[in-house]
Amino acid sequence: MTDTESGLLSSGWFRVERELAITTDARVFLCSHLPAHRAYLLRIPPGLSSATPAPLSSTQNSGLELGNVRGTAAAAAALYRQRYFGKERAHSDTSLVVPEYYGVVDSRYLMPASATYRRRGAVGFDAVTAISDLLVRMTPFWENLSLLVSAETSLMAGGSISYDAWESRWRRLLRGSSLGRDLLAHPPDGVQGRMAAQIAELVDDTTLGPGPALEDSTVLRLMVAVATRRLTDEQVKDALSCPFLRMNITIHDLTYAVALLNLLQPQDWLLQSPVEWLGPTLFVLPTITDGLVEQPATFPDDAPAFEPCPPPDDATLGRFEVFVQDPERTVRPYLALERA
């Protein structure tokens, strides 16, 4: 694959790794969802010109794949209704499963496009992405988080906290986030010179690669969804056991979850407890981290945890200009936190 073709197909959080095959109707590529550490098949029309580079969001393989998506959904619905959702499902052969198609959203996330089943009790991932970064940054929790990092940075500048202690608490949360940029734009007194440069280096760090900033993360969106009563704790628990949400969990999400848990540790320099500083939005964090330790339910092995549902309608499918497909029928582990 040439550099031009790579530019044609790579964008956002996805990267084309290599071309796998050329068929009569398509060129087949292996495509990585980088922050989620997962890979998919991407098919594009064979006549797609490599002379006009365009981002993945403009590749538009929907004309090629839309019929396949609909056909997959129809075949899967008939198969699963008989084998996994009927009266004899306990005795069914769970080796039969149809590889799913997914629609790419904003070159960042994936939504099920051919699935005819869903995790019982779980909301769709679109209910999570509906919590915008603007809403997150308007919450009392975000304001309190900003006040806490400013207060601890001020203590660090005054010598009451070592830089190493401060960095261990904040570097994961400041990386690439509005929290870090706001701290740089409005630093506490005494933050200058080498200290300011060190903070800027943390904020600009790209070690984790492409992925969500703190305010865009699934972890913080779930916390805000519960705090604003859009979701319940139980719905969050079920959602984290849903493969269609977990396929979008990134290494960044795991990093933020660990860093937020770390903030809950009592510190000698805080007159108030972390919960008093940050408020009740934190209460759901243990539910989230517990869910991220476990692997989600998988279909059809855990068929009783799922229920049949209609596939996405034409209006939903029309939102997707790019479709990708599972490369294999075996279950691949999802990113998860390690047990303490």
Image (cartoon, rainbow, N blue to C red):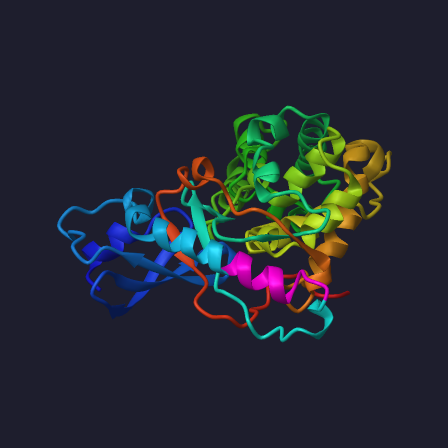
User: Mostly what secondary structure, the magenta segment?
Assistant: helix
Whether residue 331 is situated above or below residue 314 in the rendered picture: below
Identify the image quadrant of the N terminus.
Answer: bottom left
Does residue 81 belong to the magenta stretch?
A: yes
* Residue shown at the point (72%, 64%) measured from the top left: 87
**The magenta segment:** 76-87
Q: Is residue 270 visible?
A: no
* Residue shown at the point (61%, 39%) measured from the top left: 128
- Marks counted in the figure total 0
Q: Is residue 49 visible?
A: yes
Q: Nearer the viewer, residue 91 or 154?
A: 91
Left or right of 185 in this view: 275:
right
Residue furthest to the left in view is: 51
Q: Measured from the top left, where is residue 84 in percent x and y?
A: 65, 64
* Residue shown at the point (52%, 27%) measured from the top left: 185
Residue 270 in which image quadrant:
top right
Q: Nearer the viewer, residue 17 or 325?
A: 325
Q: Measured from the top left, where is residue 276 in percent x and y?
A: 84, 33
Q: Nearer the viewer, residue 52 or 89?
A: 89
Left or right of 172 in this view: 322:
left
Q: Measured from the top left, where is residue 218 in percent x and y?
A: 61, 44
Does residue 50 belong to the magenta stretch?
A: no
Identify the image quadrant of the C terminus.
Answer: bottom right
Q: Measured from the top left, where is residue 63 in percent x and y?
A: 29, 47
Q: Nearer the viewer, residue 134 or 312?
A: 312
